[in-house]
């Protein structure tokens, strides 16, 4: 107890001006975004959206993993998603290290063996993005009417560069 007091205090302030009650959970802009967990990224604001507008799925690297596909299928069929943006970014830790380096760093931090842990490092960001866009486009439950784009977000300028 107490470890989250600062955040809970902020939450009470948030609730005091909360205006999303009764909201339906549909993606009102028809948008879903798959992007990295990196704290430099603000996925809604970077494309001019706000709470209620989009489905956001984040993981290390912004990869289209099986859980990401589950989220996208649900988004497309049940939650109004018509456009999907896949957004990895420059200077991503998943691209700056090898699998071996990440295992060593985590092992040092944890003080126990981490050589068994997979991290899914990205060797070639553009090739990975091509694979990920293709995984979405070729999914049997995502119709061709859904538009899929692959972008690279520049953490130094805030700009999105469409690659696919
Ligand atoms: Zn990242």
Image (spheres, rainbow, N blue to C red):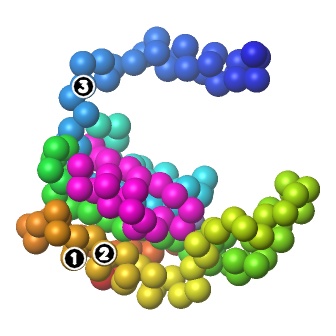
Query: Which part of the image, by quadrant, shows the C terminus?
Result: bottom left
Disc 1 secondary structure class:
loop
Residue contact between numbered discs 3 and 1, judged by CB atoms under 8 Å: no
Query: Which part of the image, by quadrant, shows the N terminus?
Result: top right
Ligand 1 within 8 angstroms of badge 1 C-beta = no
- Tell whether 148 sits left or right of 18: left
Disc 3 secondary structure class:
loop
What range of the chain is rendered magenta?
53-75
Of residues 58 and 18, the one drawn nearer to the viewer in this rendering: 58
Residue contact between numbered discs 2 and 1, judged by CB atoms under 8 Å: yes
Q: Which residue in the protein does label 3 denote?
A: 23
Answer with mark 3 or mark 1, whichever residue precedes in sequence.
3
Q: Residues within 10 Å of mark 1 (few under 14, many from 20)?
A: few
Residue 24, given in percent of the width and then of the height, sits at 21, 29
For discs 2 and 3, the disc positioned in front in the rendered view: 2
Ligand 1 within 8 angstroms of badge 2 C-beta = no
Q: Which residue in the protein does label 2 denote?
A: 135
Answer with mark 2 or mark 3, whichever residue precedes in sequence.
3
Disc 2 secondary structure class:
helix
Residue shown at 64% from the left, 24% from the top? 7
The quarter holding residue 13 reads: top right
For discs 3 and 1, the disc positioned in front in the rendered view: 1
The quarter holding residue 104 reads: bottom right
Give the label on residue 17, or none.
none
Instruction: Give the vertical position of 19 relative to 162 (above or below).
Output: above
Give the label on residue 138, or none.
1
């Amino acid at each position: 107890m107490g470890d989250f007091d600062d955040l809970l205090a902020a939450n009470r302030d948030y609730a005091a001006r909360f205006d999303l009650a009764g909201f339906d959970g549909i993606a009102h802009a028809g948008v879903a975004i798959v992007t990295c967990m990196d704290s430099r990224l603000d996925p809604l604001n970077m494309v001019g959206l706000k709470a209620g507008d989009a489905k956001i799925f984040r993981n290390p690297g912004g990869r289209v993993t099986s859980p990401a596909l589950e989220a996208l299928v649900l988004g497309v069929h049940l939650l109004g998603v018509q456009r999907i943006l896949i957004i990895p970014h420059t200077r991503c830790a998943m691209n700056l290290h090898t699998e071996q380096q990440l295992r060593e760093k985590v092992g040092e931090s944890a003080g126990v063996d981490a050589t068994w842990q997979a991290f899914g490092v990205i060797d070639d960001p553009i090739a990975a993005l091509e694979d990920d866009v293709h995984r979405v486009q070729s999914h049997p439950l995502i119709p061709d009417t859904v538009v899929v784009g692959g972008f690279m977000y520049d953490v130094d300028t805030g700009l999105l560069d469409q690659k696919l």
